[in-house]
Structures are given as C-alpha cells and as structure tokens.
Image (tube, grey):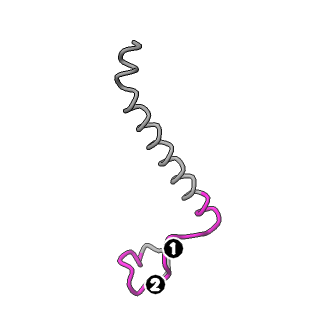
C-alpha cells in the first residue's frame, strides 16, 4: 500500500490542485451570479447567444 501511494504521489498532488482550482472557479461563478454580475459584455448586437440572454433583444 505504501509503495503504491509513493508511486502515485505526484498524480494525487496534481489532481488535488486541479480540483481546488475548479472548486474556486465554481465558487466565484456562484458568488457572481448571486451578486448579479455577468460575464456578458452587454453588446447584444455582436452576441451569438443574444436570444437566450435573459429575454433581452
């Protein structure tokens, strides 16, 4: 068991770092959503997803 743990230690550390980064990104997105902050630039004339943007035209 110890040999397996030591052999895979690098992979586990990188995985934990990546999981932490993803959790922080999701947390930031949730906080921004609650505050009403959007990643939308507000220029619907040049937006390909304009029709799905909160009912705006």
Looking at the image, which is closer to me, 54 or 39?
A: 39
Sequence-earlier tag: 1 or 2: 2
Q: Residue at x 62, y 69 (%)?
A: 36
Marks 1 and 2, how far apart at CA: 13 Å
Residue at 40 percent of width and 20 percent of height: 5
Does the residue at mark 1 contact the one at mark 2 (Cβ under 8 Å)? no
Callout 2 crowding tier (Cα within 10 Å): few <14, some 14–19, many ≥20: few
Mark 1 sits on what residue?
54
What residue sits 44% from the left and 83% below the top?
A: 44
- Which stretch did the figure color magenta? 31-51
Residue 41 in picture, x, y percent from top left: 49, 78
Of all residues shown, which one is farthest toward the bottom?
45
Determine the residue located farthest toward the right in the rendered image: 35
**22 vs 35, nearest the viewer:** 22
Using the rendered view, name the quadrant where residue 38 is placed.
Answer: bottom right
Q: Say above or below: 57 vs 13.
A: below
> Quick check: 10 left or right of 35?
left
Instruction: State the mark number for residue 4.
Output: none
Q: In the image, residue 45 lies at what x, y percent?
A: 40, 87
Magenta includes 54?
A: no
Give left or right: position of 30 versus 18: right
In the rendered image, residue 41 lying in the magenta stretch gets the answer yes
- Which residue appears at 50% of the width and 70% of the height? 39
- Element under disc 2: loop
Residue found at the very far top of the displayed protein: 1
Q: Nearer the viewer, residue 41 or 21?
A: 21
Horizontal and vertical percent position of residue 49: 38, 74
Helix, strand or loop for disc 1: loop
Residue 19 spot, x, y in % from top left = 46, 42
Q: Determine which residue is flagged by label 2.
A: 43
Count of marks placed on residues: 2
Q: Residue 24, relative to residue 34: is it above or below?
A: above
């Amino acid at each position: 068991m110890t040999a397996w743990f030591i052999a895979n230690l690098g992979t586990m550390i990188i995985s934990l770092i990546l999981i932490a980064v993803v959790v922080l990104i999701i947390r930031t997105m949730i906080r921004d959503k609650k505050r009403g902050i959007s990643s939308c630039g507000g220029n619907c004339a040049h937006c390909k997803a304009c029709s799905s943007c909160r009912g705006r035209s």
